[in-house]
Amino acid sequence: MAITISTPLLMSTILFILTCIPIPSFSCPSHQKQALLHFKSTLTTTISSSSYHMVQLKSWNPTSDCCSWERVNCTETKTITELHLDGLVVPLPDIDPAPVFSDILAPLFHIRSLKLLDISNNSLHDKIPGDGFVNLTELVHLDMKDNWFNGSIPRQLFGLTNLHYLDMSNNMLEGGTRTRVRVFSELNYTEGGLSVEVGKLLNLESLILSANFLSGKLPQEIGKLTRLRELLLQNNQFSSGVPSSTANFKNLETLDLSQNSFSMQIPASIGTLPNITAVDLSNNKFTGPIPSSMQNMSKLVILGLHNNKLVGKIPTWLFSFTSLDTLFIGGKGNGLTWNNKAKFIPNYSLKFLSLISCNISGQFPEWISSQKRLICWRKPLIFIFIMVGFWRFDTKQWITNRIGRHDYNSVNG
């Protein structure tokens, strides 16, 4: 028997189905378009009265879909998710430019669907507008490098818990946020270049804060960032020891703490990082011997320990790595010496070797002649051997002469 469906029932069914199917928008949300047009207008007005050149953003106009604009990416449903606004502002040569203040970013903070925001290399001055960034809770990637941001890192950034990538390098950030920490039921204040609240960024894989003026201790809470793959803090003013919580960085591949004022001994926990390939601790004040735990870093390619206050014999296990191609262990502060009794040939073939002021004494190590890729490149404060494999002449004597004469070592042939 045929089933008859009434027209009203059929229409209701079709209408219900249509309401359940997402229909893509044919244009980005009007409030997001207006926010971008406001940003462009503000930036254009600011740049026209200063000594900068601005990328024109010609596709940004009221009559077109903002998802089709240059430097803008959207979802299939026409919601803005990415803004690639790097290098919009270019200083003119030979002119002292007026500052471009960070408040021009205000319109962007209305686009709450953003997952990626790149505002790097724009000569932006003043403090990072934390009250604006607090709205961008969906951010996964935030790049603010190569600007003139100053002051402390706003605590609102540590509330962006979806972040995987955070780069604030090459700015003028300093000091620290005043953070309330409850200890023994009393409120105390801690200050430093990096707040304890950094431990909230549990999804972070890249933290890049290099080339700023950040100071003080690294908080133990940084060890909560167990997904980190790169931690780049070089060229700051961090001091004291490296927190023991760094032992939690089981996914870390690159660690650069160079050019700071870290002191005390290199923590043994650094040798428990199974995926580390590059470690640079140079130009600090680390003391004591090279920790034996570092021999467990089997994937190591780059190791920089020069210009510290390290003492003791250079361990032979340092030459058992199979992937190492860059080794900097010299420097005027270090008091490291060769173990001349050891007879071995390294498992790797070095490209770069720094021995400056390494207090080398006694007979020159035979294993140097096994390094066919070393060439000699000398700079005022760095002496590196990088050789391209020409060992037909008396290479040992050739290198010995230069090390003994230039690098405050005492070597016999």
Image (tube, rainbow, N blue to C red):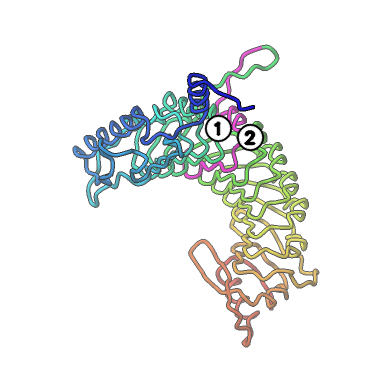
Task: Tell me which label, 1 or 2, sits earlier in the chain.
Answer: 1
Residue at the image point whose x is 43% and y is 30% from the top: 151
In the displayed structure, does residue 133 sit left or right of residue 221? Answer: left
**Which residue bears the numbered disc 1?**
194
Furthest residue in direction front, as rendered: 1
Residue 205 falls inside the magenta stretch: yes
Residue at the image point whose x is 62% and y is 37% from the top: 240
Which of the two marks, 1 or 2, is nearer to us in this view?
2
Furthest residue in direction left, as rendered: 49
Q: Categorize mark 1 by other alpha carbons within 10 Å: few (<14), some (14-19), many (20+).
A: many
Q: Amino acid at mark 1?
A: Leu
In the displayed structure, does residue 32 sit left or right of residue 328? Answer: left
Spatial CA span between label 1 and label 2: 9 Å
Mark sitting on residue 222: 2
Vertical side of 94 occupied by 224: above or below: above
User: Residue 42 location in percent, x, y?
Assistant: 26, 32
User: Residue 95 location in percent, x, y?
Assistant: 22, 47
| Quarter of the figure that contains the N terminus | top right
Residue 81 image-quadrant placement: top left
Pick whichever, 342 or 17, lies toward us: 17
Pick whichever, 183 or 289, lies toward us: 183
Evaluate if marks 1 and 2 touch, with contact meaning CB atoms under 8 Å apart. Answer: yes
Residue 119 falls inside the magenta stretch: no
Pick whichever, 53 or 118, lies toward us: 118
Q: Which residues are magenta?
A: 186-213
Pick whichever, 100 or 79, lies toward us: 79
Residue at the image point whose x is 67% and y is 37% from the top: 243
